């Protein structure tokens, strides 16, 4: 959700010449510290987004950063490397650049824990005035999410000033 609504719109607008992924796998399923339970398929999907030819012409560097479960690191790193080598994402029949979860076109705020949604909305509000691309992305969201984002934008503007 954060990638679709915040990271990728800004990344595409920034239009980098090179994408460097600092690949820490402590969010991986089975990692004793991260607790996020991100699967190799999840890492594969995120890597496909960042390594997509639409971003930096496909120039992407993946740097292993860490993690605390060797099996999780190995499986997740392999999934990422395979995507960068042009293989399909794990568990997806449509190829390396199809980013969909089973049975849905994209994640909505309904799929998120409340604290995760608030973190995304707050982060978006902080970047709102610097990245006009966010306005286009959030214009397609539910009215409730637009209202909540507007409240965060007003809060940030009150704190930071015009």
Image (tube, helix red, strand yellow):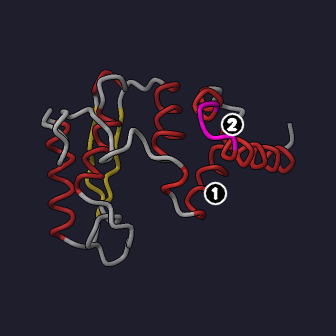
Figure quadrant of the C terminus: top right
Q: Residue furthest bottom?
A: 32
Q: Which residue is drawn at 59% across and 64% down?
A: 115
In this figure, which residue is indicated by the disc labeled 2?
128
- Most common SS among magenta residues: loop
The residue singled out by tag 1 in the image is 118
Residue under the image location 86 percent in, 42 percent down: 161
Q: In which quarter of the image is residue 137?
A: top right
Q: Where is residue 143 in the image (x, y as percent from the top left)?
A: 69, 40
Q: Is residue 141 magenta?
A: yes
Residue 103 drawn at (x, y percent): 33, 45
Magenta run includes residue 73: no
Q: Residues within 10 Å of mark 1 (few under 14, many from 20)?
A: some
Q: Which mark is residue 159?
A: none
Residue range in magenta is: 139-143
Q: Nearer the viewer, mark 1 or mark 2?
A: 1
Say what secondary structure mark 2 lies in: loop
């Amino acid at each position: 959700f954060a990638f679709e609504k915040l990271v990728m719109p800004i990344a595409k607008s920034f239009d980098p010449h090179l994408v460097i992924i600092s690949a820490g796998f402590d969010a991986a399923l089975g990692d004793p510290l991260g607790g996020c339970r991100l699967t190799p398929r999840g890492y594969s999907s995120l890597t496909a987004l960042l390594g997509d030819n639409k971003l930096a012409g496909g120039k992407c560097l993946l740097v292993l950063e860490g993690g605390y479960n060797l099996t999780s690191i190995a499986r997740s790193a392999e999934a990422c490397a395979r995507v960068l080598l042009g293989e399909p994402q794990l568990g997806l029949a449509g190829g390396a650049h199809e980013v969909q979860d089973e049975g849905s076109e994209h994640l909505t705020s309904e799929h998120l824990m409340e604290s995760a949604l608030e973190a995304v909305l707050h982060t978006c509000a902080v970047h709102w005035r610097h990245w006009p691309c966010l306005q286009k992305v959030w214009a397609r969201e539910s009215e409730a999410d637009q209202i909540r984002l507007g409240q965060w934008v007003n809060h940030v503007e009150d704190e930071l000033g015009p």
